[in-house]
Amino acid sequence: MERLLAAEHGAGVVKMLSRAGFYRLLEAVSTGRHLFGSARTRRSLGKQPKRMFGQLRTGRPGEVMEIDSTPLDVLVVHDDGVVDTCELTGLVDLATRTLAAVVLRPSTKAVDAALLLARAMTPEMMRPGWPDALRLSRSVLPYASLLPPDERLAKAAAIPVIVPEMVVSDRGMAFVSDNFRNACRHLGISFQPAHPDTPTDKPHIERTLGSVATLFAQYVAGYKGRSAEMRGKDPEAQAAWSLHELQELLQEWVVAVWQTRPHDGLRDPLMPGRPLSPNEKYAALVSAAGYVPVAFNAEEYGQLLPRKWRVIGSSGVRINSRIYDSRAFGPYRRQPSGAGPDGRLWEVHYDPYDISRVRVRDHRGTGWITATWRHLRTSPVPMGELVFDRAYQVLSERAQRKPPGAGGRPGRGRIALVRKDSESTFERIYRPNPDDLPNRFGPVQRFRRAAAYPRIALLIQLVGTGTATRT
């Protein structure tokens, strides 16, 4: 500052304040403006209105809901083996602050947003491995009064089923698209887009997604921070979860933590000293507003799912490098459907959030054919823990006996394997190279013997499920 004054007015012409006085003046001018902090926070503060904040009051679940997407600051392993970030899309209810539906995708599309509405209107079923304490029947939710009108809740987790009446979103391409608008129209939901570049029009979902980052994401292996100055050392090497595994963890966290955690925005006016949890607030409101279940039949739910045209081959239907098969495919294998663009392919609808099964339209009959993933029994999403542990044990023993890449051409046949354990570490394991077998075998024999090893069979299964990738 002294040099600027001397350059503009001359040396000694303008008297400079003392250092302490200058810093006091600077603090007084910059208070509340965040001039010397994060630019991201400064831009967010600049978008706030320069008037008194309004308040939208809601009296029943689903009256107003907000939807939005944001990058999740966690590095995950995608189906193609690439370590990268993903997007978090959530739907929150204003009256109860319930995270009615939340999904992770590489990038949010219109079909993802449409499926989010359907997931909010259907019960979240208990998953294998979840404790019984997460059941709806053992929560504060009014299970006895909700079960008679909706028997699906008998095996549901402790998260409310909320039917949206109005959905507020920003003007992202996934939300203003015709697909999402048609889904809202089909489900009888009023769609209200926010003003351009005005996050304060939907502050609840903005704060909720931020809470997911602070309460969940920062404790997950592979967390990289929300900015460069908060990034740790080599977060790519710590990525330990696939996209589907992280989705399972997030869903369990929503049921076990978010829905039972007291929320500061859920305070009763008559008892402001005690904040309520989303489940407690829903139990209080549903007793006055009532609950009417909305059941999706196969045709309605299938219309919201993304569609692909595929051939029913000898082994079944291939979707995203996974093979799905069913006994009902018998007369249709290698046969044309008589529908679609060229009359050869069959219409297949799949749920991006449930890779265990797909639904194929029966063009020669009526209804749908459900085909399950061929590795579903041995590799639950995305793979069984026992199989994973055995593969890791065998490969780690091999890696200790011989350095990676030794023998044959450098780097040939290496496989990067994501290892998930209690410490959520990331290990690189290499499979044996067929060239490392005794020289008395020819090239073809060495390859066949290497492929016959049980550990190679496990790795082939890993590659097929997208858990391992060639490097």
Image (cartoon, rainbow, N blue to C red):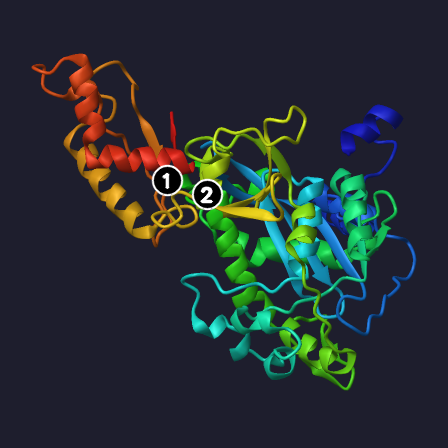
Residue 242's tag is: 2
Residue 260's tag is: none
Residue 418's tag is: 1
Q: Position of residue 462 (x, y in %)?
A: 35, 37
Packing grade of label 1 (10 A; few <14, some 14-19, many >=20) is many
Query: In this view of the protein, which residue sits in the foreground, 447 or 71?
Result: 447
In this picture, is 356 found above or below 441? below
Locate the N terminus and report the quarter of the image it occupies.
top right
Residue 428 visible in rendering:
no
Q: CA distance from mark 2 to mark 1?
A: 8 Å
> In which image quadrant can residue 176 be found?
top right
Q: Is residue 127 left or right of residue 420?
A: right
Three-letter code, disc 2? Ser
Q: Position of residue 421 (x, y in %)?
A: 34, 51
In this picture, is 395 found above or below 280? above
Q: Position of residue 401 (x, y in %)?
A: 14, 32
Marks 1 and 2: in contact by CB < 8 Å? yes
> In which image quadrant can residue 284 be found?
bottom right
Residue 13 visible in rendering:
yes
Locate the C terminus and report the quarter of the image it occupies.
top left
Q: Secondary structure at mark 2?
A: loop
Residue at 60% across, 65% down: 123
